[in-house]
Amino acid sequence: MARYTGPVCRLCRREGTKLYLKGERCYTEKCAMERRPFPPGQHGRRKVKQTQYALQLRAKQAMKRMYGVLERQFKRYFYEAQRKKGITGDNLVKIVESRLDNVVFRMGFATSRRQARQLVNHGHFMVNGRKVDIPSYRLKPGDVVEVSEKSRDIEPIKHAVELSRERTMYPWLEVNFDELRGTFLRYPEMDELDLPFDIQAIVELYSK
């Protein structure tokens, strides 16, 4: 399965915004965006006026990298969103937000989407009572996600749960940390998400 294996902090610096790819580290002073808030490379400190196309491209790259999706799959998601009824940008966000690895991260069972992807790949989660090890598996409203019985004592999940217990849960999710179980209640609305990119710019890029 193709996936990005390089340094993830470099991706945040390239997009000029925090994509929260390293979990806890992103909230500390060790975050690369706090220490070096400019693009990587020898010319990173130079200020360059970006064209409209460049802004659209950067928005698309930021979304892909934030959700851990490669180009071919992302393009497929876009055209699926375009075919659905409603606003294309909203549909696209609902598609990536319903991915199992993203929901595991949002529920607080992993400290980052990258870690959630690995945990799902290793078969630590069940959906509606059945083991699912495909990170891109799409959830539907009402689906129940839970940590499998054999995985309840592994350190990454226990650590993530401890960090998540005191934070406010997203309104489209319901989570019981004691039972290590959560329910995907509905698709999120755009005004409930604080996304670090312009979704309309992505729609304009692919609509050319």
Image: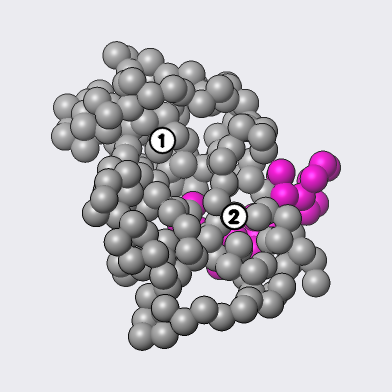
- 6 left or right of 196 in image: left
Q: Badge 1: few (under 14), some or many (20 or more) residues near its Cα, within 10 Å?
A: many
What type is the residue that disc 1 sits on?
Val
Which quadrant holds residue 30?
Answer: bottom left
Which residue is found at the position 27% from the left and 29% from the top? 163
Which quadrant holds residue 13?
Answer: bottom left
Residue 104, disc = 1
Q: Secondary structure at mark 1?
A: helix
What type is the residue that disc 2 sits on?
Phe
Q: Badge 2: few (under 14), some or many (20 or more) residues near its Cα, within 10 Å?
A: many
Question: Considering only vertical position in the picture, is 123 above or below 4?
Answer: above
- 154 left or right of 66 in image: left
Which residue is found at the position 48% from the left and 19% from the top? 174
Q: In this orientation, does residue 3 appear?
A: no
Q: Are marks 2 and 1 in contact (CB under 8 Å)?
A: no
* Image coordinates for residue 150, horizontal then vertical, percent: 21, 28
* Image coordinates for residue 14, horizontal then vertical, percent: 45, 69
Q: Is residue 34 magenta?
A: no
Of 39 and 185, the residue lying toward us: 39
Disc 2 target residue = 197
**Magenta region:** 67-91
Which quadrant holds residue 160?
Answer: top left
